Amino acid sequence: MTESAVSFSGLSYAYHPGKWLFRNYSASVAKGNILAVLGPNGRGKTTLLKLLLGALKPTTGCLSINGSVAFVPQLFHVSFDYSVLDMVLMGRARKIGLFSQPTRSDEEAAIVALDRFGMAEFAGRPFHELSGGERQLVIFARTLMSEADVLILDEPTSALDLKNQSIVLDWIARLSRADGLTIILTTHHPHHALAVADEVLLMMGGSQYSCGNAAHVLTEVNLAALYGVPLRRVLFEHDGRRIETLAPVLPMIDREDTGRPTAGQIL
Amino acid sequence: MTNLFNFADRAKRQKRSQFRWTEIILLGALIAGLLGSLMIGRFHVPLLDVVRIVLSGLPFRAAGDYDNAPWVVIEIIRLPRILLVTLCGMGLALSGATMQGVFRNPLVGPEIAGVSAGATLGGVIALMLGWASFGVVGLAFTGGLAALIAAFALANISGRASILALVLSGVIVSGFCSAIVGLLETLADPMTRLPTIVYWLLGSFVGATFEKVIVVAVVMLVAGTLLLAMRWRINLLSLSEDDATALGVEVNALRWTLMGLVAIMVAAQVSVSGGIGWVGLIVPHMARMIVGPDHSRLLPASALLGGMYLLAMDDLARVATSQEIPIGLLTSVVGTPIFAVLFWKTQARGWTNG
């Protein structure tokens, strides 16, 4: 269809010789598409991202990325109380020379990037005083500053409350659709993948994986095999729109049988 | 859109106007400190005489007025010493601010990673060999850098270099270097080499000469200019390694370049005045309180404050008592309680070794 922005084939990684974290994974993401990577802890999601970022070298296989990459880490710990503006300016690292300082035009571009996410008024605030969702938006602004073609996000919604999850997912979708960024993200929420991803990679460990169109790969059977927890695809209507989501079947206490007081009675 | 540019304007104005004024005031204070330091001492010289004498000697020592006591006090004794103190203070504060950024920890300084002890060992070896000026700086630099590499390597044994591991490695390396220095002292010829070494180890600015000023000025100007030119990049190093790499930073190359420059500057300071602790550790904190954490502004402010701070310490060392107090002792007596407060404050704010 279109050229692929990110592709890898026969990709394998082992931290210790012979102990494969994953083997022979192949996938390709078309330019402007979103790939969601799912899998239980310890199956190598973060390792895969590090391979894509070039922080680790693949044990075997090859990968190619067309364009420059920006990374949004999962936990954002900053040792110093930089202002939001300072943080966003760091996105310009490739453009600002080794012996140079950010200029006025860099600062103006940073404010414009912040404004894109409704964060311009936060420019002078200390970054560490922001909420998790606000920080994520600041990092998105920083990504725009780097003018990257591929955006890699490590669990962008994991530390956020429901509202901020929704805001961040909305921006991820917009960055892909409006800005043409190719996005690769990891997540523990299959319904987030179903909501925004074009393609999905399920990392089942070893040489087992499943990759392809999100709606085709995120099946009840695949996800139950992946997580060992049954999930159901749920369809409902909201504001006249058909919404499709995924819900895990969680253990529930049978409240009528236990005879325990309900929340209302305690109050 | 109007809103947007209001924000842009406001942020810009904030950053720019603050930049000019704070730094200009600091520079003015440093110049005032220089003149004040030239005035005070056992032999008081009035301000106007200080200015006249300094200006008269300016192109370069037109003619020595050796019969004139104020001229001798200013030109031969105080001026070289005060310039040396200021350069060393600036270098130490720049080194500290850089190391804190590179290690992503506001609680490190040159003395903690073993640089000072390594530089001292290098200097002692140079003196054993009978070398002087640039020879001492050269070996002190080699020693400082070697100690830094050794501390890094030890800290990396566990695979992940935590700050705690680095501090402990620094203790190990410092202990080793100090032991070797002691060993060399017992081996040194008591008639020729030992007095030079002991005098040098005591560490003070008493023997300041223009020759030393030139040695230190050359080193500090070259290394300091490079460090200042790269100061914005230090912000990027204080991000996580993956993050900085993804932003296009050559993390390891940059880190080692900066650490090499730090080792050179610490070595230059150690070679002329022995170990002076706690300056590189606490001055950047003071600077951070004034200009904030952005290294674009932190490094120049640290340099100016560092010069002022060490100048004040040296003035105190000269005039506080009838006998001169070794400046290394003074910076430790003043610095450690300040550091204790900083430690308590950073811990209370939940700063952890990351």
Image (cartoon, coloured by chain):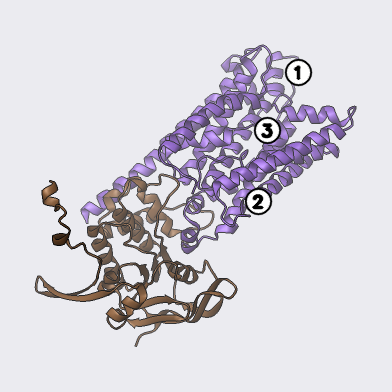
What is the CA distance from the residue labelled 3 to the residue labelled 1? 33 Å
Crowdedness near tag 3: few (<14), some (14–19) or many (≥20) residues, C-alpha within 10 Å? many
On screen, residue B222 versus residue A42, left or right, reads right
On screen, residue B196 versus residue B325, left or right, reads right
Across and down, in percent, residue B248 comes to 49, 63
Amino acid on which disc 1 is placed: Tyr
Q: Where is mark 3, residue-wise?
A: B275
Q: What SS does tag 1 mark? A: loop
Q: Name which residue lies at 65% across and 53% down.
A: B153
Q: Where is mark 2, residue-wise?
A: B154
Please report, as a chain letter, where disc 3 is located. B
Q: Where is mark 1, residue-wise?
A: B66
Please report, as a chain letter, where disc 2 is located. B
Q: What SS does tag 2 mark? A: helix
Is B21 located above or below residue B162 in the figure?
Answer: above
Please report, as a chain letter, where disc 1 is located. B
Q: Nearer the viewer, residue B16 or A164?
A: A164
